[in-house]
Amino acid sequence: MSAAVTDRYGVLLALVRSESASAHTANASMQKAFTSASSRNPTSAIAENVSKNPLAAGMADIPGFLVLAGGVPIKVGKDTIGSIGVAGAPGGNLDEACANKAIEKVSNRLQ
């Protein structure tokens, strides 16, 4: 697995990759984090919207966007202060669960 953390604008702050993770997981985690930070939404919600709304389908074509579950905004109140993207689990729902768990783990330090 790989995990990427960005600032509120989607600029990479940190990236970690398990030694056994496939190489593509690093890029996927960065793109998921960028997508989430840029949109201020979980990438799972974007993927659902794209699948149900033909007018939103073009979001998948935005350079740098990856419309797959696993990107979650980091919020303090209503303000998005960053994002985390996770890739490499056997399913985007598990990537997203990992991202949410990481945010939960540090939530007491977010201001």
Image (cartoon, rainbow, N blue to C red):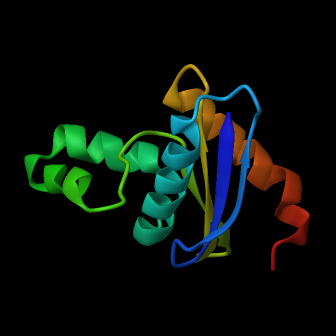
Count of labels in the image: 0
Q: Position of residue 84 (x, y in %)?
A: 63, 56
- Quadrant in the picture for residue 106: bottom right
- Quadrant in the picture for residue 99: top right
Q: Nearer the viewer, residue 72 or 33?
A: 33
Q: Position of residue 42 (x, y in %)?
A: 49, 53
Seen in the image, is 102 located left or right of residue 31?
A: right
Residue sitting at x 40%, y 47%? 45
Residue sitting at x 51%, y 48%? 27
Which residue is at the far left? 54
Residue sitting at x 51%, y 78%? 9
Residue sitting at x 9%, y 54%? 55
Seen in the image, is 89 located left or right of residue 36?
A: right
Vertical relation: 92 (above or below) 78:
above
Vertical relation: 101 (above or below) 65:
above
Q: Position of residue 58 (x, y in %)?
A: 15, 55
Seen in the image, is 49 located left or right of residue 14?
A: left
- Quadrant in the picture for residue 80: bottom right
Vertical relation: 64 (above or below) 91:
below
Which residue is at the far top? 90
Quadrant (top left, top right, bottom left, bottom right) of the C terminus = bottom right
Q: Position of residue 21 (x, y in %)?
A: 66, 29
Asked if residue 41 shows in the view, the reply is no
Asked if residue 104 shows in the view, the reply is yes
Quadrant (top left, top right, bottom left, bottom right) of the N terminus = top right
